[in-house]
Amino acid sequence: MMLAWLIYRSGYIPKWLGIVLAIDGASWSIMESGPYLLPGIDLSFLFVATFGELILLVWLIGWSTRLREPIMNQAAS
């Protein structure tokens, strides 16, 4: 969830990737804590939401190499 927040706020990486990772992190947390907090509910359908990690992997391999270095503003002295 922290990585999703950092990606969303960065402005250097697309915001949609941060949203996908936030959904992935929330579903992973619910899936892992579900047997303890909600023992009578089947949460196996949340497995689909964990494909956010795969989307991050594909983005890092395919599109992250196309990013340009950020231009820093230099103060006039």
Image: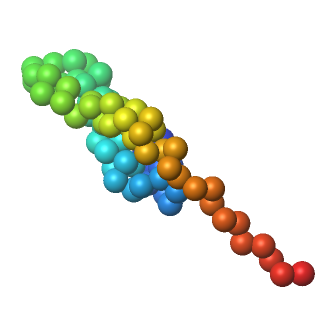
- Give the residue at the far right of this rendering: 77
* Residue lying at 20% horizontally and 26% vertically, measured from the top left: 47
- Left or right of 59: which side holds 24? left
Tell me if I can see residue 25 in this picture. no
Tally of marks: 0
- Left or right of 77: which side holds 56? left
* Residue lying at 63% horizontally and 56% vertically, measured from the top left: 69
* Residue lying at 39% horizontally and 49% vertically, measured from the top left: 18
Quarter where residue 59 is shown: top left
The quarter in which the N terminus is drawn is top left
Foreground of the two, 31 or 9: 9
Q: Is residue 69 above or below residue 26?
A: below
Q: Position of residue 66 (x, y in %)?
A: 50, 50
Foreground of the two, 31 or 62: 62
Q: Position of residue 56 (x, y in %)?
A: 39, 37
The colour scheme used here is: rainbow
* Residue lying at 52% horizontally and 56% vertically, measured from the top left: 12
- Left or right of 9: which side holds 68? right
Q: Is residue 38 above or below residue 10?
A: above
Q: Position of residue 62 (x, y in %)?
A: 41, 39
Tell me if I can see residue 14 in this picture. yes
Quarter where residue 75 is shown: bottom right
